[in-house]
Amino acid sequence: MADPVGLAALIISLIALLATTGQLLQQYFATADGFRRCQPSVMGLWAEKTKLRWRWREFRFETIFAIPRIVYEPVPVDTGKAAEIMVGSDNCSLIDTQESLKRSMIYPGWDSYDARKYYSSDELVCWVPLLAQYVRLHNEFWILVHIMVADSCPRLHSQGRDAVQYFPQKPGSVENDTMVPAIQIIQKSWDFMPTDVVRPMASSTVSDVAIMARRLGMVWKSFDPASGLMRAEGNGHVITSSTVRSLGTVLQYSFTSRKNAANCYYIPVREADKLGFGLVEFDHRLFGPKMPRDLDVGSYQGIASTLPLITSDLIGHSSPTGIGSALQELSRLIKSELDFIPGLNDLVPLCSAMLSVTPSTHKDRWLNQIPAPNSYQKGVTYTGAGILAFEKLLREHIIAKSNLASEQSKEVLSCLKCLQSSCGPRWSNEQDWEHWDYRKGDEQGNEVSAKSMVMQYHTQMTEFLQSSNVDYRHLVGEHALMAICSMSDTPDNKLYQNSVSDIHFFVETTMSYYFKCLPHIAAKVSAKSRRWKPDSTLTAEEVEAAWFSMMFRAFCWQRSHVMISDVPPLSSEYWNSKMPVYIG
């Protein structure tokens, strides 16, 4: 029979051993700093990638976790395919497919028990709902360095889905690159997290955050990342900034309304995003691939530094003396606080490629909104008065030239007449074309929309300019110098100053001046062509035909896009900025 005292001692010893062992294990697991901060209640499904790694030399555990780096990038070749979620792949486009939802580790909806289990937690990091398809927030989140979440707005996944559906990337394209939100999965160690950080942080860049805010329908009231002064609001949302020691800028998000103003469907291409920074990317089909920079129309300093790209004889060489007087006049007009400056905003449709795309059916959404690159009115080529004046003056020009009128000038006039007869007064009205109906219009009796017709004419004019002997850069440059100086180089200057309040009369007067200066433009372009190519035989008629095509192309471009006004552009220095930002 066992000794009761010995048995009791054995039991007590076992209990003590277990307690000691538990304390020892607790101490070892306690060395895994940050492990409790990477649980499902904090990271959702991303917690599945959290693991402990034993470090023998230090005799402790290290916490390894995964976070996303949120960026905007061109649509990859394998978008929407299983290859995107292959083991070892670090990138995933957020396009609302089963594969991308799985790879980005979020639930497809918020109505299931499992989804509510994670997404209703007050401890959840804000970048998890940011990645989700739909968001129902009931509290405020602290967002580290510039990332924002907007309730009832298009989520990142739905943004990517619409971009892929309506703006498919053409294979091998180097222009109009469709930009979709994407993540790069990064493995991190908690050992290198600052002591002030209490939750895992995702990352991004200043440029990507700025684009994201605009696409979510928000407006930056203050955007100075270097100083940490940032405030974005709009579409029922507000983001304010504060500075946290050892972290940098922290943004706090709150919502004031659950209604979506439906104003955040911007054209999802790189060129449109650039416009939000005041930058106009040149149409490489017309300007060639060697343009070293974009045209900066967001500020006077930007214009002064980039206008020589199109006004100089050679790219990168010193500009002619004519640009000095043009910039002087431009500075005077900007200081006088005029909001309609001839030649300034017309540079956008003259230099840019077509950013919108033709809908395949009348049921497709026609995404045509773009951010305005500056705060001035949209230009002579935007107004209905400009269209009517251009058609009238072109008709008079052809009549005056009689048999000497070029075939291209007659073709442009024919296109204008066709649009006027097919579209009626809508062609010459400044309004959104979102609700234009399809109608039978082609030779086979197929339904053709007015927007499709306009975009076809834009393509037609572009192809003509490509085949023309006229150097398009020289043509745009001489037109820009003439247009900017149009308010000072004419005896009718007082008439211009008195007619600024009457935009229609002002535009008609400006267009008349353009036609009056056309022989001078033709002479300047021909002279540049001879300096560029001594054996050039460029005639005035060829330059005039190219100018008519250029102007009509600009009218078509303006009718194919809706610029969101009253939203100032961000500083161009932050475009493509790789300044790192973090999301907590």
Image (cartoon, rainbow, N blue to C red):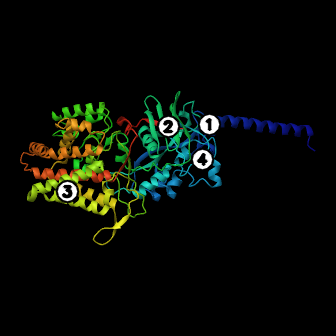
Q: Are marks 2 and 3 in contact (CB under 8 Å)?
A: no
Q: CA distance from mark 1 to mark 3?
A: 68 Å
Circle 4 sits in a helix, a strand or a loop, which is it? Answer: helix
Crowd class of label 3 (few under 14; some 14 to 19; many from 20; radius 10 Å): some
Q: Earlier in the sequence, mark 2 or mark 3?
A: 3
Q: CA distance from mark 2 to mark 3?
A: 48 Å
Query: From where the camera sits, is residue 390 visible?
Result: yes
Q: Which mark is residue 44?
A: 4
Crowd class of label 4 (few under 14; some 14 to 19; many from 20; radius 10 Å): many
- Disc 3 marks which residue? 464
Q: Earlier in the sequence, mark 3 or mark 4?
A: 4
Q: In which image quadrant can residue 315 be found?
A: top left
Q: Is residue 288 left or right of residue 92?
A: left
- Identify residue type, mark 2: Tyr
Q: Is residue 29 above or below residue 266?
A: above
Circle 1 sits in a helix, a strand or a loop, which is it? Answer: loop
Q: CA distance from mark 1 to mark 2?
A: 23 Å
Q: Are marks 4 and 2 in contact (CB under 8 Å)?
A: no
| Foreground: disc 1 or disc 3 | 3
Q: Which mark is residue 513?
A: none
Q: CA distance from mark 3 to mark 4?
A: 56 Å
- Disc 1 marks which residue? 32
| Foreground: disc 1 or disc 2 | 2
Nearest the viewer among 278 and 523 is 523
Q: Residue at x 30, y 30 (%)?
A: 335
Q: CA distance from mark 4 to mark 2?
A: 18 Å
Q: Position of residue 403 (x, y in %)?
A: 8, 59
Q: CA distance from mark 4 to mark 1?
A: 20 Å
* The N terminus, quarter of image: top right
Q: Residue at x 12, y 52 (%)?
A: 542
- Identify residue type, mark 4: Gly
Q: Is residue 297 above or below residue 381?
A: above
